[in-house]
Image (spheres, rainbow, N blue to C red):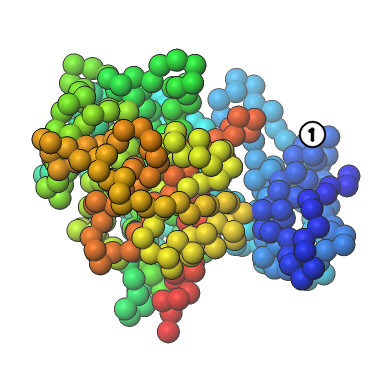
């Protein structure tokens, strides 16, 4: 077969990583479609460098993957062997690690909500720690632990569900420990395994309630990054992977519009929309990584707003950060991963929409600029001396043709790799 690589780049410019990744994925998909058992890849006209070779290999692994767990008669792929005819032998370990993390994220997001429960996410975290005991440890906080830490925002969202909440904390520690003076990194993922909207129930054909299993896409990306980094074992920085996981359901114990919650840092929140629940869980998770872990650089990732989908569509994640350096590093990490991020404004004037007469703030604004006001809400839980960024992946977490994409796992991995390199003497 012949596969195109897209538009020819400008003179002196290189093809973007996403083109090479898409090339590998398309080749594997075409081979499967034609029931080929062997695939040999060669590249004409362009000479892929090491980064491009790894992107091709990762694309092949992702394109070859089929999630058939829930089929009564799953089909087995005929593709058994892939060979690469490159001038130099590529190092495939990074590609395998990145692909395995993205595949884990795809499996978690793709699983139905009666399977990918908060308890299932916690068990996934335990399995990761047991598979990589030299670098990963895990701690699971139960409801009583969260009550002791006064996580009123997280507990409020979880209180209507019969599924027990799980607060998941994985720690990556490099062999030999972190480098002296290295920043402490934290990745925080939104872990709503199903979001009904609560009493502001998702209703109508555009509500996407049937797809709200993907509302834990941020948690899936964080767990996928933990798996990739455990295989790559970067020296330099310790990393905390934190997920406040629960369901947002309706019941007699459920959160009501008008309720006031107190988060673990003492801030009070007037809930004017129970469907803006992810930011409530993230508020306590962000407080936790700063207070309990000493994190100095924090990235949260979440399927947070439909407004971000309206603004950027389904192929680009929104990015907010007060720090130019951190924002640029994440965009660069996305480029290396073949995932698009676009920096959005933190318009402080919009915070007026979030002011409450009864509490410190409301959990939603007036409807305009909703993705921005959501980011501004999260910013309220960040200490002044902490670098922070927020990624809204509501659009690219799901593809209507392919299903779960695993978006974000590779970007987070590349960001941690870059921070680790900078931390080394």
Looking at the image, residue 328 lies above or below residue 169: below
**Residue 159 visible in the snapshot:** yes
Relative horizontal placement of residue 80, taking residue 407 as reference (left or right) = right
Rendering coords of residue 198 (x, y %): 29, 23
Rendering coords of residue 173 (x, y %): 36, 66
In this figure, what is the number of numbered marks?
A: 1
Relative horizontal placement of residue 117, taking residue 67 as reference (left or right) = left
Q: Nearer the viewer, residue 264 or 378?
A: 378
Q: Quadrant of residue 422?
A: bottom left
Q: Quadrant of residue 299?
A: bottom left
The furthest residue to the bottom: 425
Q: Which residue appears at 23% of the width and 17% of the height?
A: 251
The residue that label 1 is drawn on is: 33
**Residue 175 visible in the snapshot:** no
Rendering coords of residue 245 (x, y %): 32, 38
Q: Nearer the viewer, residue 389 or 181?
A: 389
Relative horizontal placement of residue 58, taking residue 285 as reference (left or right) = right
Q: Which residue appears at 21% of the width and 24% of the height?
A: 257
Q: Residues within 10 Å of mark 1 (few under 14, many from 20)?
A: few
Q: Which residue appears at 39% of the width and 57% of the height?
A: 321
Rendering coords of residue 108 (x, y %): 48, 37
Q: Nearer the viewer, residue 84 or 217?
A: 217
Relative horizontal placement of residue 238, taking residue 318 as reference (left or right) = left
Q: Quadrant of the C terminus?
A: bottom left
């Amino acid at each position: 077969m012949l596969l195109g690589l897209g538009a020819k780049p400008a003179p002196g410019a290189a093809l973007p990583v996403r083109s090479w990744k898409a090339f590998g994925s398309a080749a594997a998909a075409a081979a499967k479609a034609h029931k080929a058992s062997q695939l040999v890849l060669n590249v004409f006209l362009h000479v892929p460098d090491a980064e491009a070779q790894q992107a091709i290999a990762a694309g092949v692994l992702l394109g070859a993957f089929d999630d058939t767990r829930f089929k009564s008669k799953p089909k087995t792929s005929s593709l058994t062997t892939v060979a690469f005819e490159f001038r130099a032998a590529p190092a495939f370990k990074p590609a395998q690690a990145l692909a395995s993390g993205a595949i884990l994220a795809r499996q978690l997001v793709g699983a139905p909500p009666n399977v990918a429960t908060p308890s299932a996410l916690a068990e996934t975290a335990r399995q990761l720690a047991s598979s990589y005991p030299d670098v990963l440890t895990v701690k699971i906080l139960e409801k009583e632990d969260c009550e002791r830490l006064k996580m009123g925002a997280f507990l409020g969202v979880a209180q209507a569900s019969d599924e027990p909440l799980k607060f998941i904390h994985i720690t990556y520690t490099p062999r030999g420990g972190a480098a002296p003076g290295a920043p402490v990194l934290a990745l925080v993922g939104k872990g709503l395994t199903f979001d009904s909207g609560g009493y502001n129930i998702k209703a109508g054909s555009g509500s996407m309630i049937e797809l709200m299993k993907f509302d834990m896409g941020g948690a899936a990306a964080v767990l996928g990054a933990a798996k990739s980094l455990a295989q790559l074992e970067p020296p330099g920085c310790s990393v905390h992977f934190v997920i406040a996981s629960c369901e947002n359901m309706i019941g007699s114990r459920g959160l009501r519009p008008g309720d006031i919650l107190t988060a673990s840092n003492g801030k009070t929140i007037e809930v004017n929309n129970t469907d803006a629940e992810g930011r409530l869980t993230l508020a306590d998770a962000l407080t936790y990584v700063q207070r309990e872990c000493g994190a100095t650089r924090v990235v949260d990732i979440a399927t947070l707003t439909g407004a971000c989908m309206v603004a950027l569509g389904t192929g680009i994640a929104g990015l907010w950060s007060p720090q130019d350096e951190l924002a640029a590093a994440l965009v660069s990490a996305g480029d290396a991963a073949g995932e698009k991020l676009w920096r959005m404004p933190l318009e402080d004037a919009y915070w007026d929409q979030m002011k409450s007469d009864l509490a410190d703030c409301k959990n939603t604004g007036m409807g305009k600029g909703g993705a921005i006001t959501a980011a501004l809400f999260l910013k309220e839980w960040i200490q002044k001396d902490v670098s922070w960024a927020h990624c809204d992946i509501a659009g690219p977490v799901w593809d209507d043709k392919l299903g779960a994409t695993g978006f974000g796992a590779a970007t987070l991995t590349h960001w941690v790799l870059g921070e680790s390199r900078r931390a080394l003497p």
